[in-house]
Image (cartoon, helix red, strand yellow):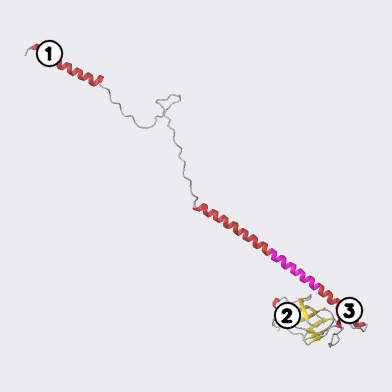
Amino acid sequence: MKSSQIYGLLGSFLSGIIIVLLLMFVFMPFEKEEEEEGIMVSFGDGIEGLGETVAETATPITPPPTPPTKEELMTQEDEETVALEAQKKKEREEKRQQEMLIAEQKRQEDLERQRIEAEQAAKTAKAGKAGAVFGQSVGVGQSSGSGTAGNPAGKGSSNGNDWSLSGRDLRGGIPRPEYNANEEGKIVVSIRVDENGNVISTTTGQGTTITDRTLVEMTLAAAKKVKFSPGKNNVYGTITYKFKLN
């Protein structure tokens, strides 16, 4: 092979290597480095930062409604219970005050009735005494039908008990109450007697010293069994029961 050919081959080979190197380092594009994901933030005092600022708009998330907790439900129930108890207490207080008012009215009525009966009994007794002084009998003390004449004095004793009823006589005795209480004192019973001599009403009169309610009720019941002589009109009087300790 001639030297000119050898130089030609070497020149071609070197030219090819140079072309390849130029293509690799100059003309072939470089692969871009993968950028890291994220949001670029602008730092600095100026408007323009070190990089491009990307603004992202966040979509607002509406939280789901929170159901009422057990504690809230219990609080509501407690409040309703307290309100209901307060209402019931108010109704009980109003009822108690109403009952007290009715009881006080009844007591006042009883006192007024006793006062009227006592005044009537005093007037009747006074009229009976006046009739006895002048030797005359009181009209209400006259008997009707086959009955005996009335007692102008209109008072007496029976079984240790006293009675007072102007113009009338006691028929029989004064029965004792069936309740045997170990009490000492007296129970004054205001009575109203009809034309036939029957006791038609009884109430506790002034001067009563015994407070045993059962004994008082039994004494009022016993006083209704007392019989007097008949006479004109209804008359008022008293029966005084005396009790001693056993």
In the current view of this chain or complex, which residue is farthest to the right? 134
Mark number displayed over residue 153 = none
Distance, label 3 to label 1, CA atoms, is: 183 Å
Mark number displayed over residue 127 = 3
In the current view of this chain or complex, which residue is farthest to the left? 1
Please tell me which of labels 2 and 1 falls first in the chain: 1
**Amino acid residing under circle 1:** Gly
Q: Is residue 233 magenta?
A: no
**Amino acid residing under circle 3:** Ala
Q: Position of residue 101 (x, y in %)?
A: 72, 65
Task: Give the residues drawn in magenta, as a range.
Answer: 97-115
Name the residue tied to disc 1: 8
Distance, label 2 to label 1, CA atoms, is: 164 Å
Q: Callout 3: few (<14), some (14-19), or many (20+) C-alpha neighbours within 10 Å?
A: many
Q: Position of residue 76 (x, y in %)?
A: 55, 53
**Amino acid residing under circle 2:** Ala
The residue depicted at 72 percent of the width and 68 percent of the height is: 103
Q: Looking at the image, which is closer to me, 188 or 55?
A: 55
Q: Position of residue 97 (x, y in %)?
A: 69, 63
Please say whether residue 188 is visible from this viewpoint: no
